[in-house]
Amino acid sequence: MKPFVVSIMLLLSSSRLFPREVAEVFTNGKTLDDILWVLIAAMLVFLMQAGFMALETGLSRAKNSINVAIKNLTDFIFSVAAFWFVGYGLMFGRTFSGLFGMSDFFTALDDDSWKATFFVFQAVFVGTAATIDSGVVAERARFSTYLIMSFITSALIYPIFGHWAWGGFFYESQAGWLQRLGFLDFAGSSVVHSIGGWVGLAGAIVIGPRIGRFAADGTPQKIPGHNIVFAYLGVFILFFAWFGFNGGSTLAADPHVAEIILNTIISASFGGITAMFLSMFLGKSKLPEPEMIINGVIAGLVGITAGCAYVGSVSALVIGIGSGFAVYYGTYFLERIGIDDVVSAVPVHAFAGVWGTLATGLFIRERFLAESGLSRIEQVGVQALGVVSCFIWSFGLAYLILRLIKRFVPVRVSIEHEKIGLNIAEHGTSSSISELSDSMRKVISDARIVGVKKLETEIGTEIGDLTNYFNIMIDRLKEKEEIADRALESLKAISIRDGLTKIYNRKYITDYLEEEVKRSKRYSNSLSIIIFDIDFFKSINDSFGHQMGDIVLVRCAETLRNNLRETDVIGRYGGEEFLVVLPETDLQSAYELANRLRENLAQLKWEFDANRKVTVSGGVAENLDDDAAKLIGRADELLYVAKDKGRNRIEK
């Protein structure tokens, strides 16, 4: 093998400080060129943390951006610690029946340069797997919940499946069971990316969607990120770092790296192109959606990761196109089933990872297929077995653990904390510009001032001056809004109440009945109405005057209202007619209630004539898939039947 020397090593190896003969030293079978290439690749992979941080914070709201950034750093340091303690041994230790490693815990790296290099490279890989679910559950997961997710991913889920697929990478005779069957996943479409995506999916299901992500009827509501440009910076960083992710997985300074990186570029490019055109032709806006272009590029990177060393450039193009379709339709599918994935990490990493792993079997070049000893169909079958095993293990275990945790402690923040943002709720910090931006957005979107709080003002800064002006504006607008609210309440009361009896007027009670009829049909609930009419009301007006007639109307309305249930609603339907709406009440119950009300009215005493009884007649009808007008018509007909039979009675 010709030595692979990067430009830095050319300079070092030509100097007296770094003699050529040192570069030829073998360490555990590896040349110094191999070690340096893998370390440089590890540094590139480490940059993926910065890329994910920029991507996820850009696609999140400003009030959660600091929380997302903190998670991206803490998941890396926690994952490295967990991997050093136990994960590395489970993944690359000497195998127990191909299921898990049993050595190399608390990894000792002294005097073994290659083992130290190998650990560093694998540690940045586990950091990548652990950070993927951050974007899925952003903006509502508790910080402690996320740390638990990162820990179980790094210490258990990722290492165990990694042992099944890659267990023989350090000790060649210690392969895991999938690896022995011929499973191929060169740089981790399944081992790294699908693992992270499936864990994130489990978290999204257990934790639930963000407030406002879905309407009451389940319709998805877009919650835009606060800085798409920052998200695009993250994609550029990830694209660059992926050269180390895939190229470094050779674990040697191998000329084949150039082909691997070429395939990586091709797949990512066509993944982005495909997702862009799909959003233009099939999306609601018919425009190239910025988020979909981002996700298409990353999906293309994920998709090629499994087969970048095994397929040709044309196949890489096809894999990229397939990845674009996977992320577009995967995002649509998750929205339709009510799963909230803030950055579409599940379609990008899990779905595209599945496609890339299967595509490796479909498009693997003949010379690599001959080395595996499998037919193409058999290779696809092994790849499918690996995909299914990955899902069952990672999603299943993560879901069970999170459900168990949820039984004892909350896994998401409170509604109040989610509304104010996790920057403040989880870390007690915020940026002045984000606070001002969020408050102004609330004023604009809600068109209300009452719920807007004044902001703390920085002294001596431009943003502080703007905040002060904002606070003054809020004070003045609140005063005007309170005056307007009082006026509106007064107008509303006038518009829906009968001026004499103070019960609801005809328009309100009939509108209310129409809504109750619709609800009764929707939920198959009972609904009945009563129409009362005061008997011989004209004779009261004629004998005692209209003033006494008004008193009769007021007392009758008051008596009826005071003897109804809380759920019943009464209104004045005509001159001396009252309409009572009885939700979730069948005909017999309504009839009995109507008779009790009739008896209550008959017992009233009147100052203008102590011996006179004021009685009512009534008609009761139950909704029989009518509209409101027909229902009222049937009750009205029964009212006249009651009158014809002598009054002071109820007919049903």
Image: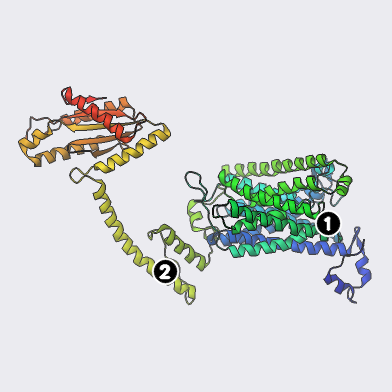
The crowding category of the residue bearing disc 2, from other C-alpha atoms within 10 Å (few below 14, some 14 to 19, many at least 20), is: some
Regarding residue 621, the answer to whether it shows in the image is yes
Image side of residue 95 versus residue 521, left or right: right
Where is the C terminus found, in terms of image quarters? top left
Which residue is denoted by mark 1 in the rendering? Answer: 250
Image quadrant in which you'd find residue 482: bottom left
Give the x, y percent position of residue 584.
36, 32
Numbered circles on residues, count? 2
Secondary structure of the residue carrying numbered label 1: helix
Residue that sits furthest to the left in the current view: 543
**Which amino acid does the dot numbered 1 rest on?**
Thr
Secondary structure of the residue carrying numbered label 2: helix
Where is the N terminus found, in terms of image quarters? bottom right
Tags 1 and 2 in contact by the CB under 8 Å rule?
no
Give the x, y percent position of residue 609.
6, 33
Which residue is denoted by mark 2 in the rendering? Answer: 470
Q: Depth check: 213 or 170 in front? A: 213
Distance of label 1 from label 2 (alpha carbons) = 57 Å
> Disc 1 vs disc 2: which is toward the camera?
1
Task: Tell me what residue is drawn at x 54 percent, y 55 percent.
Answer: 285
Residue that sits furthest to the right in the current view: 21
**Which amino acid does the dot numbered 2 rest on?**
Phe
Image quadrant in which you'd find residue 8: bottom right
Regarding residue 109, the answer to whether it shows in the image is no
- In this view, 377 is above or below 67: above
Give the x, y percent position of residue 358.
75, 45
**Which label was assigned to residue 167?**
none
Q: Depth check: 220 or 387 in front? A: 220
